[in-house]
Image (spheres, rainbow, N blue to C red):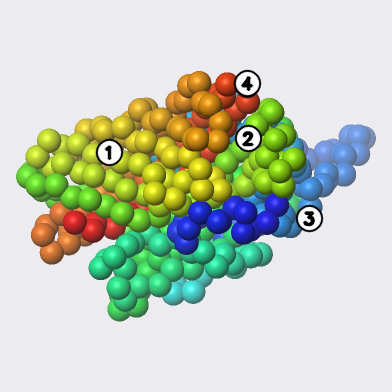
Amino acid sequence: MTARSLHAIAALLLLAGCGGGGGGGGDGAGPGASTPPSPSEPPFGAAVPADAGEVLESAGPSLYALLPASRIWFGSAALSAGPDVTDLGLTFDGRRARVAVERAAAGSVVLDTDDAYRDDGLTFSVFYGAVGSGRSSRDRYVYSGTANSATSGRVVVDWSHSDPADYIAGGYWLHAGAGSTGWEAGAYVVGPELSLSDPPGLPVSGTATYEGDAGGVYMLTGDFAAQRRDAGLSAEGDFTTEARLDADFAAGTVGGCIGCAYGLIDGSGSLALGTVSFDRSNGTFRGANVTLSTAVVSITGSSGKWAGQFSNIPDGSGAPRLAAGTFDATASTGDGSTVALVGAFGAGRTR
């Protein structure tokens, strides 16, 4: 599986260097206690992966099995198929970005761009159009491991040249800790302008269109996966594509699509984000009305979730300058195969 096959769809997102991992501990042993076992190797191998596909195919249940139980957390936006997310932290000094995903009773997953093992030439930008002027983006894949944990992920950080405090990051993580039997998956978007403690002041009239990038990880199973491998294509890996949202501030609604212009996986498929109401008090929105479609295989039914937040920084018209969030989707195909994906998006206002 090549990076080109995963990114052939367009120069866009998900998810600069980052990485992290948790550790394990044990009770102390007094005199006469049996000798504790030696630390095991990282759960799914010590070698740094070539890409997300190598991580996903190494071991554990499929994303299809994980994602129906995934959860949404705001403050900024995160979606996790593992333990509950309780906090998201981001630090950025103009070079190094560090994202910390705190999980209930499960420790933290840390994505640190200093742990990068590969840069991506097709960076997704959280912004688009006029909002993107005077800004830079950095896109890195990260991996870190200990004797009993492993973390793989992608971090894209976007920042203003004139204001170092104006930054935002998005991406995904895959994590396995001590005792894990499979990979935990999650996606996130985090930054100062998506803070719940400083909510946006939203217009009460007018509309806005937001366009930008999206990306994440996917996994295919069954005959569909076998057919792709036979054709020299990947059955798991990461993807990069475009995102569009349409907001109606008078009606208090927002909806959109991921991949409608460039496709989701190797140029095929899209994820429709059904129209939902947003919370005027804090600018958040969520829904369980997503529809995954593709012309490559017949999908008999799909489900999933999406969620996001409006920026607390207005553009010249008073509307939020961007909207960002996360999504997941699972689907069954006509031949009994399954498709699953999880990712994040960021889109700046274009009109």
- Could you say whether the residue bearing mark 2 is in a helix, strand or loop? strand
In the image, 4 versus 237, the foreground residue is 4
Place of residue 132 in the rendered image (x, y in percent of width and height, measured from the top left): 31, 68
The x and y percentages for residue 18 are: 57, 60
Between circles 1 and 3, the one closer to the viewer is 1
Looking at the image, residue 47 lies above or below residue 292: below
Q: Disc 4 to disc 1, how far (Cα)?
A: 30 Å
Q: Nearer the viewer, mark 4 or mark 1?
A: 4
Q: In this figure, which residue is indicated by the disc labeled 4?
A: 336
Place residue 114 in its image quadrant.
bottom right
Q: Residues within 10 Å of mark 1 (few under 14, many from 20)?
A: many
Q: Residue 244, image x and y in percent? A: 32, 48
Q: Amino acid at mark 2?
A: Leu
84 with respect to 248 (left or right): right
> Along the polypeptide, which appears first: circle 2 or circle 1?
2
User: Label 1 is placed on what type of residue?
Assistant: Gly
Mark-to-mark CA distance, 2 and 1: 26 Å
Task: Quickly name the residue at label 1.
Answer: 255
Mark 2 lies on residue: 220
Residue holding disc 3: 47
The residue positioned 25% from the left and 32% from the top of the image is 276
Give the SS element for disc 3. loop
